[in-house]
Amino acid sequence: MLASQLSTLQSKLGYRFNDSSLLKQALTHRSVGAQNNQRLEFLGDAALGLIMADILFMHHPSASEGDMSKARASLVNRQALSTLGRKLGINELLVLGLGERKSGGADRDSNLCDAVEAILGAVYKDGGYDACYECVDKLMRDDLPTESLDEIKDAKTRLQEMMQQQGLPLPGYEVATIAGEEHEQKFHVVCRTALSAHTAKGTGSSRRKAEQDAAVAMLTLISESPSGEF
């Protein structure tokens, strides 16, 4: 990637790195080798969750814990972060192994989501909490609810309400596989609805997160179908 491309990305982030190698690492997929973005993704995921909790707590003093949790889940899900990744042009900057690139990895939602989290982890590592907070606020300000958290509903709730409005059975969620060690499990869930002949898949570190991810994917399927309503 060119230095000018990294400079443009930093302008979009509203943050200039002291150590530019962190940004390069954040854009490097695990298919390349050991020096990839997975550790920064782990850090960025945690930082983003805390910062969004901080923002919601500060701006919505009367909101319940449940409402804030649902709002945060909706704001930082895979669909939201992959959309942000495309807006930032990360799909043109990702460093991928040959096989991953040939299979369309540059525009894969999961890769873009991971890269966004890794970039935030890099900002946190390079500049600390305040710098990361300012970056998140700049990037996600337009998506934040300005008045009530009722403006935001998590994907499972939106999908359920869509089915109820049309008098259809509620969505079904099934755990397809559980991979990994007990302390680091990855759940794979399949979602089925009467509105789509296709199934939607989701992954997450818990069944709840995987179901939310699958619901997001199903909403996308329905919205993109010729007769779907979103």
Image (tube, rainbow, N blue to C red):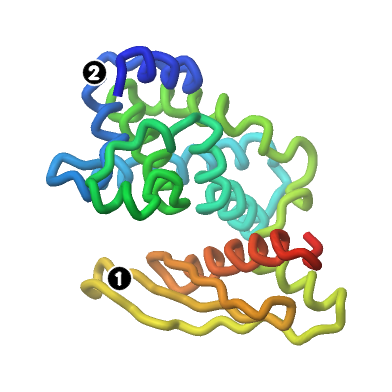
Q: Which residue is mark 2?
A: 19
Relative to residue 108, is residue 203 depicted above or below? below
Q: Is residue 33 above or below residue 88?
A: below
State the image coordinates of residue 139 (x, y, percent, origin top left). 56, 29
Disc 1 to disc 2, how far (Cα)? Answer: 33 Å
Q: Secondary structure at mark 1?
A: loop
Along the polypeptide, which appears first: circle 1 or circle 2?
2
* Residue 117 x %, y %: 40, 41
Look at 48% across and 28% down and name the residue there: 133
Give the answer, above or below, for where 27 lies relative to 190: above
Q: Position of residue 95 (x, y in %)?
A: 28, 37
Q: What residue is disc 1 on?
A: 185
Could you tell me which quadrant the C terminus lies in? bottom right
Q: Is disc 1 in contact with disc 2, using a CB cutoff of under 8 Å?
A: no
Please state the horizontal and vertical placement of residue 63, each as a whole percent of the image.
70, 49
Q: Nearer the viewer, residue 72 or 2?
A: 2
Using the rendered view, name the quadrant where residue 8 is placed: top left
Q: Nearer the viewer, residue 48 or 191?
A: 191
In the rendered image, which quarter is residue 59 located in?
top right
How many residues crowd mark 1 within 10 Å: few (<14), some (14–19), many (20+)? Answer: some
Instruction: Tell whether 121 sits left or right of 15.
Output: left
Q: Is residue 113 at all visible to an observer of this figure? A: yes
Position of the N terminus, as image quadrant, is: top left
In the picture, measured across the screen, residue 200 lies left or right of residue 187, that is right
Along the line of sight, the residue nearer the viewer: 34 or 14: 34
Amino acid bearing label 1: Gln
* Left or right position of 127 against 11: left
Kind of residue indicated by mark 2: Asp
Indicate the quadrant where residue 65 lies: bottom right
Q: Say what secondary structure mark 2 lies in.
A: loop
